[in-house]
Every structure is written in structure tokens, then in C-alpha cells.
Amino acid sequence: MKNLLAPTFHPFQVIKNDAARSEAELADIIAEPGFGKHFTDHMVDICWSERGGWHRPRVQPYGPISLDPSAAVLHYGQEIFEGLKAYRHADGSIWSFRPEANAARLQRSAVRMALPELPTEYFIESLKQLISVDGRWVPSAPETSLYLRPFMFAKEAFLGVRPANKVNYYLIASPAGPYFSGGIAPLSIWLSTTYARAGKGGTGAAKTGGNYASSLVAQQEAYDHGCAQVLFLDSEEGKYLEELGGMNIVLVKKDGTLVTPQSDSILEGITRDSILQLAEDRGHKVERRRVTIDEWREGAANGDIVEAFACGTAAVVTPIGLIKAEGFEIGSADAVAGELTLSLREELTDIQYGRREDTHGWMTRLDA
Ligand code: PLP
Ligand code: COI
């Protein structure tokens, strides 16, 4: 059996927040959580240094982080993060979905960004520790959850350009409703032909802040065109689908085949991987390959491509109704949500909320 505790695993110190929100304040927040607006009473903080490795894990009151103005992250952006959710089941228990996959992706991102790898056991323990003090923040209304945001950055005060010798890992949490204000109404998406998100040999496959910073101007372009997200193409030929600013993309053909872009420069989404597995379990064919925007245009026009959806932790599974681009459109703003899209969404959320058997062993209990 796998050793559950890494050799470097230290016990967590817990410092309680004396100013924790009252039950009444919490009830008001949870009644209308929005997304990423409110934060729980505590956070996790673990230090790393080249000489000491991972040390001094603690749960402490949520609050500002003190940084030296020369801290490397502020200059060179050496930072990575993750996103996953804690779900409350009908019996009150609290669960997360494939947290070991997020831990593994954080490790891959760390390697790419020359940051230290946090052992999986430490990562999962950080989730459990935060839930042990802030479990009351996990909402129970349908489609709500506690969004968990682990992140890590270079704290060393030093202006030379090299990997930092002092790094901290943090975990914060935020009660969440739907990411998009329209819920699961089909999205309009802007296709950017001006900007690329990532390039060959770049950091596209890592979950690092710079990828999001570079997407913001394109995301603004999307808003300006009345769209909720931006779709990026590959940076070399500008014709292969990559992903959206904050989620992956999947197309559905009329024979039930699911097609999703394969590329070294997109983030390997855990939601996408899970949805494709569920589709395969049902007997659908899944193609992970390069796919051009022209293939989508032609397929949508001749009836070969019948659905498209965005997927990610925040977005869950959200249908795509319209792609708007300079000079052409695919689909329409008043398209109805695809049938397979909705049924895969339902199956996934049923597993996450404990309404359906977890045959893949994807769920990890956080409150016990
Ligand atoms: N792609 C990007 C750029 C993202 O930010 C996300 C969200 O985390 C995803 C894809 C989907 O990943 P996951 O399903 O693991 O949340
Ligand atoms: C997530 O889905 O967890 C993300 O990080 C994407 C972001 C749009 C919130």
C-alpha cells in the first residue's frame, strides 16, 4: 500500500480566528455566494525553503500576506495555483472530487515553473485541515459548493532572475454558486484571432497566473462583443482549437462521438477527463486530437457537429450556443442546450453531490 504520509509531513498547527463570522453573517453570505467574492475565516500556509524543505504547516486566520517589495513573484510571476470544490452531501458530509489529480497537476505546474513540488499527502491534508475549521462554510443549496483555491508562489526577496529559494503554499476557500450569471444557459464565446494564450514550449499546460494575465485583454475583447469567454487558437498556425480562458472545450458529433483538442499548450482539465470517461462508459467514442475551427464551422453547417460545451471546475459543464468571430459565426445566441451535454453534466454533478454511485472512486471525504 502507498505510504500515506510523506517523510517530510509535519503536523499542522491551528490558530483559530477570533473574529470568525457569526452564524447570521455566514447565512447571509451563503444565501447568495456568487463566485470568488467571499472568503472563509481561515487559510492554510506552508513554508518551503531550499534547506528546510516543506515546513511549518499551519491553519491561521484568513488575512493579508506580508511581502517584501522585492519578492520574486511580484517581478517575475513565479506562481501556480489550483481550483477544486468541496461538496456537501445530503447526510451533511463534505467531499472533494479527484483531489489527487489536482495535487498531481500542481506538481506538474511546479516543475514547469521551477517551484517545489508539494507532496500529494500534504495537499490533501491541507484541504482536510481547512475543512476541519471552516466546514460550516460548505453550502448545501443545489449547485453550490465551497471553491478551494490552493496556490504557491516565490516569496524570496531578491531581484536576480533565478528560481526562488523561499516559497509558500496557501489554501483559501470561497463559497460558490454558478460561475456564469446565466447558470447553464448556452454561452456566447468570442474567438480571438489577435491573441494567443500559449505557445509551443511555453507554459500553457501549467496552471500559472501568467497564462491568465495574458488572456485578460482577449477576455475583455470577448466582453466587448457581448461574450462570456474567449476561445483561443494555436499560436503557430492560428487554426487549431485550444481552450477557453478558464475552461476546456468539447464538441459532440451527430453519431455521439465527442471530440476535444489535444495540444501540449492547454491545461489538462480534470472535469474534461472525467466527462470523457463517463461518455466512454456509456459507449460513446472519444477523440482527443487536433481540431480546426474550419472543421467546427463546416460540421455545424452540415449537421455533423451538433453540440459543444465548456467544462472546468468553475464552469462545471456549460453548453456553448454561439461562437462569434471576426467575419463569421457558428451557432446562434438562442440555441438550446444540447441533450448529451446536459445529461453528462447531470451524471457528473450527481457523483459530486453523492446522488449517484461513485464507481470510479473519484470522491474523497474531507470532514472525517
Ligand atoms: N483550462 C483552463 C485554462 C482553466 O483555467 C481550467 C480551470 O481550472 C480548465 C481548463 C479546466 O480544468 P479543471 O477541469 O481541472 O478545473
Ligand atoms: C477553475 O475552474 O477552477 C478555474 O481556475 C478557472 C477560473 C475561470 C475560475
Image (cartoon, rainbow, N blue to C red):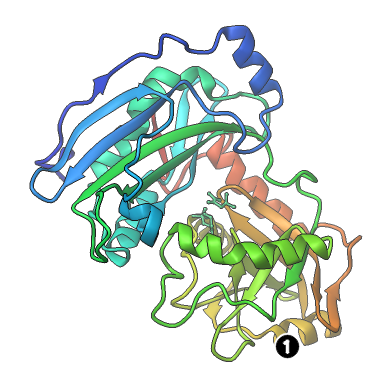
Of residues 97 and 258, the one nearer the viewer is 97
Cβ of mark 1 under 8 Å from ligand 1: the answer is no
Q: Specify whether 368 is left or right of 30.
A: left
Farthest-out residue, right: 334
> Which residue occupies the foreground of this view, 164 or 56?
164
Q: Is residue 132 left or right of residue 323?
A: left
Residue wearing tag 1: 294
- Please state which amino acid type lies under the numbered disc 1: Asp
Q: Residue 138: horizontal and vertical position, in percent?
A: 54, 25
Residue 186 x %, y %: 80, 56
Q: Point out the image quarter for the C terminus.
A: top left
Question: What residue appears at the point 53 percent right and 12 percent down from the top-left corner?
Answer: 21
Residue at 40%, 42% (x, y): give it: 150
On the image, which quarter does residue 54 sit in? Answer: top left
Q: Is residue 368 visible?
A: no
For the point 75% across and 64% down, the residue is 222
- Decide: few, some or many residues near mark 1? Use Cα within 10 Å; few <14, some 14-19, many ≥20: few
Above or below 208: residue 42? above
Q: Horizontal placement of 207 versus 285: left or right?
A: left
Which corner quadrant holds the N terminus?
A: top left
Asked if residue 326 shows in the view, the reply is: yes
Q: Where does residue 326 sit, x and y in percent of width and height? A: 81, 81
Q: Quarter-wise, where is residue 24 in the image?
A: top right
Q: Look at 58% across and 91% down and name the residue there.
A: 237
The location of residue 221, given as percent across then percent down, is 74, 66
Disc 1 on helix, strand or loop?
helix
